[in-house]
Image: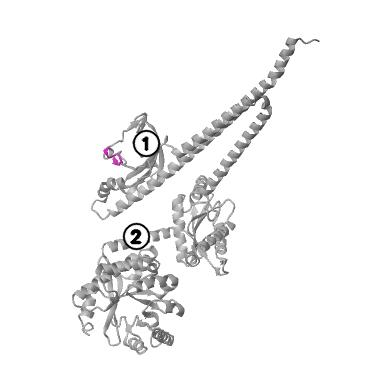
Amino acid sequence: MNISVKDKTNLTKYILWLPIVSVIISVISILIVIYITIENNYKLQKEMIINDFINNLKTTTKQRIEVAYNILDWLYKSNLDKKNPKEATLKMIPEIFDKVKWGKKGYIFIMDFKGNTIYHPNHSLIGKNRWNLKRNGQMIVQTITKAVLKHPEGAFVEYWAYNPLGKRPIKKISYVKEYKPLHIYLGTGVYLDYLDKKLLQKQEENRQLYINLFKKILIISLIILTIILIITFYISNKIKNLFVNYTDYLQREKRKLFIKANYDSLTGLFSKSYFLNLVEEDIKKIKNNSTKKGALFFIDLDRFKEINDSYGHDYGDKILQKVANRIKKHVRNNDLVSRFGGDEFVVYLKDVDKDIIKDVASRILNEIKKPIENKNGIINYVSGSIGIAIVPDDSINLNTLIKYADIAMYRAKEEGKDRFVFFNTKMEEEVKKITKLKSDLIRAIENDELEPFFQPQFDKNDKLYGAEALVRWRKNNKFIPPFEFIPAAINLGIIDKIDLFIIEKTIKQYIKWKNDGLNPGVISCNVTMYQLEMTDFARDLKNILDKYDFNPKYLNIEVTEESIMKNPEISISTLEKIKNLGININIDDFGTGYSSLAYLKKLPVCKLKIDRSFIKDLPNDKDDAIITSTIIAMAKSLNLGVVAEGVENKIQRDFVFEKGCDYVQGYYYSPPIEAKEFEEKFLKGQYGSK
């Protein structure tokens, strides 16, 4: 068969164009595949960025409402003593809320359930009723109000909002929450078309990266078309690696963000927010299956603060890590463990009965209190107190369960620590009583219901040396003794306010006596360990002295031996600052706090007060007689003065003076009495004349 020249030419063309066409088709196919891959990846990234951004905005709005709620609650409570607290609060809202910065583009609106605008940054809307406000066929205010009524504790609601650019209404999400005392609700929201500029910029940069890559591939493919088979393989391989690496990078970064957001960086346990979400999911399952139960443990470490302060935060962190690992050892794989903050841990046990709960709690407690050795070889011990609330027996509301478990945990501490306690309704009633007592005590300070009583102190010649100021609470014209409220004040963390209040009031009374020409001698005031742990106590004391231009030599500060020995190093530091103000310091209740002689020599004190427990049976109790004599002898050897408390008869008085005691106080002379009676009896009467 002969082939013509024309056929050869055509064959040559075919041979020449066949690979070219094949390569072009291959390149186009590859570019199409790459383009589709790029577009799909781009859409996934865009969706992820938008979802993350909206979720973040929802969290932000929720936090903003909580801040606004607390401000409103504070305003209302600060007006409770007024004739019409609601009206007073509503009047103050615009002024206060206008001053608060709510973040970029953030704002707060407040409305009542009739559609009246209580507060809006656009003051022209305040006072208007927008109940029938309608956009895109939606009754806006009614939609929001219904959401609040359905979810008074807080809810997100989506609706058509006013467009600040003047165009058609746009979608908006607001978080709203009812403030029940005023029967109003607060809200804040974000427009759905607002996205973070930085995220959009990054999104656009990624898109441009892909576009540029697409162009380069196309250009390179066209330039080296003659060797396209090799180049195509090379480029396709490069592109594949690029996408694989980039996808791997995105996955790694996503995993890092997930871990950072949902796990505690120190212990590796679930973060608080992630833990609560997981527990909430299980509670929903329990609601649908009443045969199942869950248990929430609230765990607080005992003595952790003491160890943390003594050995430093690095060692404290190691203890928290060890405790976290010890807790995880005794729960099942499907149970949840979280560090709530500080030395607090929370455990949630799924699908359990009471026997399992007790067993797990016991094993956790036993594991926690195993010895822990620090880098210097010193062995330390911590223990735990656990409060337990049961789902659904105690509640199916997560916040309520946490509150109940917390209440039970504090009961475990009160009962001696290193134990677990189940919540019961009586505990909540007791907490309510304590909360009311705290409120009453704060109000007592504000209403000037607390006042000092004075118990005189005498030397061996029955000459008035001074007096100890002891707090009393006058409520409804009756005096409440300190043992009924001082322990509660210490536990509630308001004893510092009471101490400083009584010191200031005592100084004012002292100055009045001096101005009247009377000589009250030296006044002693009590402070607690809580004050010693506060770094600014000496400064507060100095401010009071300066305020009244009071000579510090007429003021003694008394601290119990037990308080000092709880943390002697901190006590020494704080007491030194007080001593430097010119104030003398007495150790109260001496003999009950187990002071070491080494610490006693370091403490900047001038007197020891022998505890009344050693005085009451003198001189018949030989042990008390020996202890009292020894304390007096030791004090004299250290050049310290001695005061005997609780002297009730002449025999006791004569005994302690015979042993070398400097001053006495007690019912033999007088119980603590009001300032007016003290003045008449001891400053103007027979003792005052000596």
Q: Is residue 50 visible?
A: no
Q: Quadrant of residue 685?
A: bottom left
Helix, strand or loop at mark 1: helix
Q: In the image, 197: left or right of 456?
A: right
Q: Is residue 193 visible?
A: yes
**Above-or-below relation of 237 to 405:** above
Q: Quadrant of residue 249?
A: top right
Task: Say which mark, if any, is on residue 6.
Answer: none
**Above-or-below relation of 172 to 312:** above
373 and 680: which is toward the camera: 373
Q: Quadrant of the C terminus?
A: bottom left
> What is the three-letter code of the residue carrying label 2?
Lys
Q: In the image, 271: left or right of 150?
A: right
Q: Residue at x 71, y 13 (%)?
A: 10
Q: Residue at x 27, y 68 (%)?
A: 546
Is the C-beta separation of discs 2 and 1 under 8 Å? no
Alpha-carbon neighbours of circle 2 within 10 Å: few (<14), some, or many (≥20)? few
Residue that carries the numbered disc 2 in the rendered image: 436
> What is the three-letter code of the residue carrying label 1?
Thr
Residue 260: % across, % down: 52, 49
Determine if the magenta segment contains residue 67: no
**Above-or-below relation of 128 to 671:** above
Q: Which residues are magenta?
A: 117-124
Label 2 vs 1, first from the N-terminus: 1
Task: Say which mark, if any, is on residue 143.
Answer: 1
